Image (cartoon, rainbow, N blue to C red):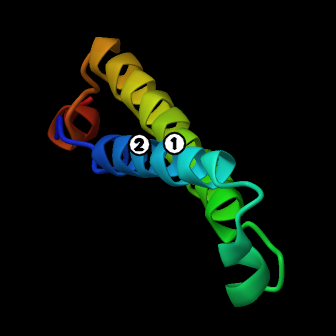
Amino acid sequence: MGFDIRLPIGMMFSVFGVLVGGYGAATRGGEMYTRHSLGINVNLWWGIVMLMFGVGMLLLARRGSSAVRKAASRPAAESLKDRIVK
């Protein structure tokens, strides 16, 4: 149970968010935005959204892995059979 899908998803969205947001920041005053997207820098805004989602997934993956480590460090619980016998 060591694989957490949130880690690679978070890394992927973070990298894509930086790339798309960086492209949007580099082409901020371009004519492309006035013709195609009503003057809204779509690349910049979606880059920010993807980056926030990626960071959120990375934080959830970190929180989940710490919960797994805490559960593994606890002493093993008694089995149901041991509880009934007592």
Q: Decide which of 70, 45 is in the foreground and name it.
A: 45
Q: Decide which of 53, 36 is in the foreground and name it.
A: 36
Q: What amino acid type should be assigned to the residue bearing mark 2?
A: Val
Q: Tag 2: Cα neighbours inside 10 Å, few (<14), some, or many (≥20)?
A: some
18 is higher (above) or lower (below) than 40: above
Q: What amino acid type should be assigned to the residue bearing mark 1?
A: Val
- Residue that badge 1 annotates: 18
x and y percent of residue 22 in the render? 57, 44
Q: In this view, does 25 lie to the left or right of 83?
A: right
Residue contact at pointers 2 and 1, CB within 8 angstroms: yes
x and y percent of residue 62 in the render? 45, 28
At a point 66% along the width and 76% down the height, the residue shown is: 32
At a point 83% along the width and 77% down the height, the residue shown is: 39
- Residue that badge 2 annotates: 15
Q: How far apart are marks 2 and 1 (CA)?
A: 5 Å
At a point 56% along the width and 56% down the height, the residue shown is: 50
Quarter of the picture holding the C terminus: top left
Q: Is residue 29 left or right of residue 18?
A: right
